[in-house]
Image: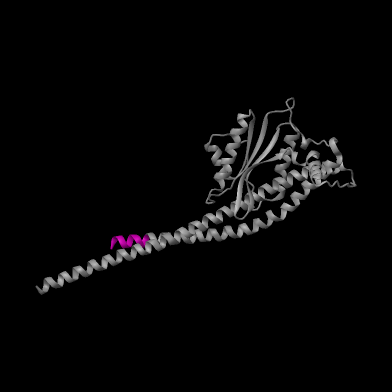
Amino acid sequence: MAKARAIVKRRKAVRNIRKITKTMQMIATAKFQKSLKRAVATKPYTKKVRELVAELASSLGESVEHPLLRQPNAATASHRIALIVLSSNRGLAGAYNGSVLRAAKSFFAQQEAAGNKIDLFVSGKKGVSFFNFQKRPITKRYDQFGDLPAFAEVERVANEFMKAFIDGQYDAVYVAYMNFISAGLQKPEVATLLPLSSVSATDAAAKQGRFKVATVYDFYPSAKELLDELLPQTVKAQLFQFFLDATTSENVARMIAMKSATDNADKMVKSLTMEYNRARQSQITTELSEIMGGVEAMNG
């Protein structure tokens, strides 16, 4: 009887855990749907801004110059770069945090082997805990970003890094995050935020040459004035997109992890039920044998 009671208690505990994981799965699904709409809605804007900046750079030709397009050389390089790591504030998200942090750790090893010093900036408690455990100093941590990062908060962060880059404090700014490609595919990446090399005149000219189409635009105000206005906006939009992709990927990972936990709990309940039935059947058989033995003893 003691064994059957222990199985009943364990089955009850597993059922309670299943209720929790099922609820967390439903919450993660709702958050994913909300964050997905934001991430998907902003991607066309981010892409179009970069295309427009590339066209502006192409119209200026080789004379295009801007502090945000600065490429460090041997004379001006500080050999110091900034790395922003986007992790989550909570766990139970499968391999989400581990994948991003491994990508950041690999990037550290690569850059330090190249002789660069790295200033680390971390968003999310899981990333902070990891780097504290690794005894790697964190220059600044960001705790203000939740499930729905606000553009105003991201804009302030982007302004800080643009100022540091323009002042020559950093040769480059990178972001380690989970790139959301689709609901079934997310990849940890370390992307370049600054300098904006992908919107240079050379790349724009290469695209035109590939399609053999040269489009001529008239700009008002001038192309240079527009470029001065749009380049900072491109950095802000790109960083905001990184945050949105990271949040959406986190919700997907948690949704999948909680679904897997719920399914495993269902399997465990079925297994415990079968084990309880066998134990109960064995107990009944033993009791019947004892009764029959007692009857036979009385009749004898």
Instruction: Give the residue at the far top of this rendering.
Output: 75
Residue at position x 26%, y 68% in the image:
284
Instruction: Give the main secondary structure, helix, strand or loop, of the magenta stretch.
Output: helix
In the figure, is residue 276 to the left or right of 300?
Answer: right
Residue drawn at the location 16% of the way across and 69% of the way down: 293
What colour scheme has been applied to the protein in the rendered image? Answer: one colour
Q: Position of residue 170 (x, y in %)?
A: 70, 33
Residue placed furthest toward the bottom: 299
Q: The N terminus is located in which quarter?
A: bottom left
From where the camera sits, is residue 109 visible?
Answer: yes
Tally of numbered discs: 0
Report x, y in % for residue 175. 66, 41
Q: Is residue 248 above or below residue 171?
A: below
Percent x, y of residue 92: 52, 51
Towards the viewer: 187 or 31: 187
Does the rendering let one see residue 196?
Answer: no
Q: Which residues are magenta?
A: 1-9
For the C terminus, the image quarter is bottom left
Q: Report if residue 2 lies within the magenta region.
A: yes
Q: Which residue is rendered at x = 74% and y = 43% of the image? A: 235
Q: Is residue 282 above or below residue 229?
A: below
Q: Give how far across and how far down residue 94 sits, in percent.
A: 53, 50
Residue 97 magenta-highlighted: no
Quadrant of the image occupied by residue 290 = bottom left
Q: Is residue 60 left or right of residue 154?
A: right
Q: Is residue 259 toward the left or the right of residue 71 in the image?
A: left
